[in-house]
Image (spheres, grey):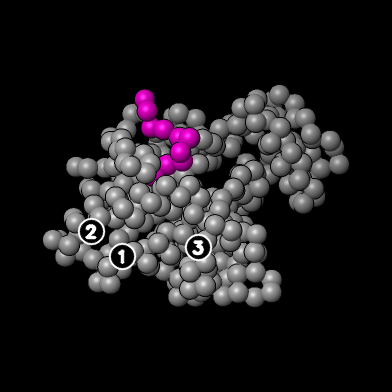
């Protein structure tokens, strides 16, 4: 097989443009080596000899494009990642939402985990809501990702013991079945989450969310794509709702209608119209 550790500049530009068009993910010279390394592995798996031939293949094959986008995305997550976000959820966001819903007779909290990776985030949210929502309320969670492989892991809900670090013991005993090989999320909790494929460059097929989590995802997009994604979130949310992004991410300077919110625990954004 040809050595594609170093793409030609023309090849890199071809991949870079196609990836951006299909997903909004922005590769630069800084992270070029990441693309090259993962492309090399994909060529090995597919048996295609050159980067140029593979570029031609994904240009005309939507299924293979999905596999390729899966291969080049980074999926780093863990249960209760950034605990202050969940503290703000419990002590600030939920009380605000419940105060609005009770008078309206709406007893369902709707949440979207966008870029859910292998499922740790939506399962964390589901455990928190199961514990903290009043008994007369229910919740619905949609969890989406660009990676089909990650979605399969998330749907299965099985994690080895190194992956459940950070889950409170009471939650681990209540919401997971333990075996010698690891921990599996109980069916009753898995049934509360809908896992589905979604490309964030496209408008959301789901609406009326009270909370959207999209943490550590916007960093992979350039400013134009970030604005598109954030505006899609706005369109998918209720008139009084909240948006979480990563602690190192910001909407500052972006053409968006979201308002900045600083709480005792963390910062987030709200749609309030």
Spot occupied by residue 265 in the image (x, y as percentages of width and height): 37, 44
How packed mark 3 is, by other alpha carbons closer than 10 Å (few <14, some 14-19, many 20 or more), is few
Task: Name the residue at the left extreme.
Answer: 103
What residue is shown at x 38% (from left), y 32% (from top)?
Answer: 251
Q: Earlier in the sequence, mark 2 or mark 3?
A: 2
Horizontal placement of 71 versus 45: left or right? left
What residue is shown at x 40% (from left), y 36% (from top)?
Answer: 228
Q: Secondary structure of the magenta portion, mostly?
A: loop
Spot occupied by residue 11 in the image (x, y as percentages of width and height): 70, 29
User: Magenta region: which residues?
Assistant: 244-253
Q: Was residue 251 drawn as part of the magenta stretch in this picture?
A: yes
Horizontal placement of 102 versus 128: left or right? left
How packed mark 1 is, by other alpha carbons closer than 10 Å (few <14, some 14-19, many 20 or more), is some
Identify the element where label 2 is drawn. helix
Q: Give yes or no for contact between labels 2 and 1 (Cβ–Cβ under 8 Å).
A: yes
- Tell me the residue that label 2 is attached to: 98
- Tell me the residue that label 1 is attached to: 133
């Amino acid at each position: 097989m040809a050595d594609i550790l170093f793409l030609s500049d023309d090849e890199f530009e071809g991949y870079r443009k196609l990836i951006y068009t299909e997903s909004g993910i922005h590769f630069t010279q800084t992270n070029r080596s990441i693309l090259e390394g993962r492309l090399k592995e994909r060529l090995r798996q597919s048996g295609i000899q050159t980067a140029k031939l593979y570029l031609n293949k994904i240009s005309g094959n939507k299924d293979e494009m999905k596999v390729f986008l899966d291969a080049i995305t980074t999926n780093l997550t863990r249960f209760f990642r950034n605990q202050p976000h969940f503290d703000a959820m419990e002590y600030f966001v939920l009380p605000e939402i419940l105060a609005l819903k009770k008078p309206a007779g709406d007893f369902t909290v709707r949440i979207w985990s966008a870029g859910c990776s292998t499922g740790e985030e939506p399962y964390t949210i589901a455990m928190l809501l199961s514990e903290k929502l009043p008994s007369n309320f229910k919740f619905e969670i949609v969890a989406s990702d660009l990676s089909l492989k990650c979605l399969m892991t998330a749907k299965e809900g099985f994690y080895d013991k190194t992956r459940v670090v950070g889950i409170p013991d009471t939650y681990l005993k209540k919401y997971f079945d333990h075996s010698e090989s690891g921990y599996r999320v109980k069916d009753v909790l898995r049934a509360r989450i809908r896992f589905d494929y979604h490309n964030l460059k496209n408008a959301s097929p789901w609406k009326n969310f009270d909370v959207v989590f999209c943490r550590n995802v916007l960093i992979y997009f350039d400013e134009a794509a970030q604005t598109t994604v954030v505006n899609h979130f706005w369109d998918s949310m209720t008139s009084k709702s909240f948006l979480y992004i990563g602690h190192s991410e910001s909407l500052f300077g972006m053409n968006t209608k979201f308002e900045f919110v600083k709480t005792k625990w963390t910062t987030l954004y709200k749609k309030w119209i």
